Image (cartoon, helix red, strand yellow):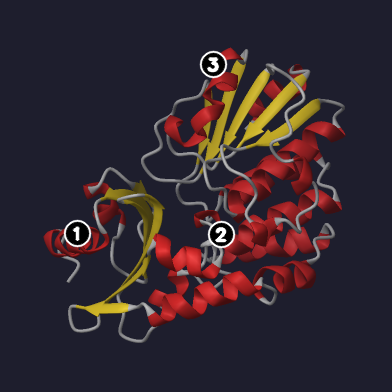
Amino acid sequence: MNSILEAINEARTVLICGHIRPDGDCLGSAFALRDYCRELGKSADACSPSPVPESYRFMAGSDEFNVLTRKSYDLFIAVDCASFDRIGRMEGYFRTAERTVCIDHHEGHEGFADINLVKSNASSTCEIVFDLLEPTGKITRGIADSLYVGLSTDTGHFMHSNTDKKVLYTAYRLACLGADCHGIATKLYRSRSRAKTMLIAKSIEAMRFYMNGKICIIPMTQQLLDECGISSNDTEGIIDYAISVNGVEVGVSMCAERENEYKVSFRSRRRHVNDIAAVFGGGGHIYAAGCRIFGRTEDVIDKILKAIRDTDVE
């Protein structure tokens, strides 16, 4: 960890980059590191290949996301990225940086940066960033807010199996440092757009059950997204409705990205779904993983069910 802090101290300009279709953990860790660097007097920006989803636009500084003030940066920090391809069109900034860092919590990390801080047993990248920054004594209230967003979302508001005593202690410490826990929870879980509400309703209606109710698949076709007036970037959390049904062991959400291309997410309470995602070149965590699958809707569903059977999930 000291090598990362040293790299930040030695740099004059820093770019923190998250992955394509950023989630709460990605944004929280990016904003926290950006603001920490600025506290040190650095010129720091945060970005990803995709815009901030509507559900996270309440986060302070989200309006500055993807506003890059330089053509190149001394230090490039990738957050929540297990592989190089996750930084997408930002790879040019990575290649021209004098030093590169990656902070991540996914299994199977590629180790693509000069310095890689990877803890696959951590609940989130925000948990790792908290451990990195806490000894500096420079976690402001704004940084605490950002880190709390990532900690909360990547643990399912402290309901997923990755919620352990370390997670709860980190949440406690962030609260002590000024994180607005109630306000953040309200904005994350008790406030949503009409479009997102329609998506939830139509997704529940579209649920399909297989293997005696053990598998629940939610297919979000392009037609469904268009009917709701919502983009694929704003579908985070839909999979939780699949895994919350009694008797379901594996929940799957399919989100149309392009014609005949689906972003697929897997969740489970006790099955190893990263093995299923790996069949399609994806990965993630034991109980939460994802991949891309190409084909028409029914073909993609057939491929998913075959992979589930072949990996002995049934």
Figure check: 215 above or below 223: below
Residue 161 visible in the snapshot? no
Residue 144 visible in the snapshot? yes
Q: Amino acid at mark 2?
A: Asp
Q: Is residue 77 left or right of residue 41?
A: left
**Marks 1 and 3, Cα distance to the nearest angstrom?**
38 Å
Q: Image quadrant for the N terminus? A: top right
Q: Amino acid at mark 3?
A: Arg
Of marks 2 and 1, which one's residue comes earlier in the chain?
Answer: 2
Residue shown at the point (29%, 52%) measured from the top left: 277
Q: Amino acid at mark 1?
A: Asp
Label 1 secondary element: helix
Q: Which mark is residue 95?
A: 3
Label 3 secondary element: helix
Q: Image quadrant for the C terminus? A: bottom left
Of marks 1 and 3, which one's residue comes earlier in the chain?
Answer: 3
The image position of residue 306, as x and y in percent, is 14, 61
Q: Is residue 59 left or right of residue 48?
A: right
The image position of residue 45, as x and y in percent, is 74, 32
Label 2 secondary element: helix
* Label 3 close to label 2 by CB (< 8 Å): no
The image position of residue 105, as x and y in percent, is 49, 46
Residue shown at the point (34%, 48%) measured from the top left: 283
Q: Which mark is residue 196?
A: none
Q: Which mark is residue 299?
A: 1
Q: 10 Å neighbourhood of mark 3: few (<14), some, or many (≥20)?
A: few
Residue shown at the point (33%, 48%) measured from the top left: 292
Residue shown at the point (56%, 37%) measured from the top left: 49
- Between residue 145 and residue 19, name the one nearer to us: 19
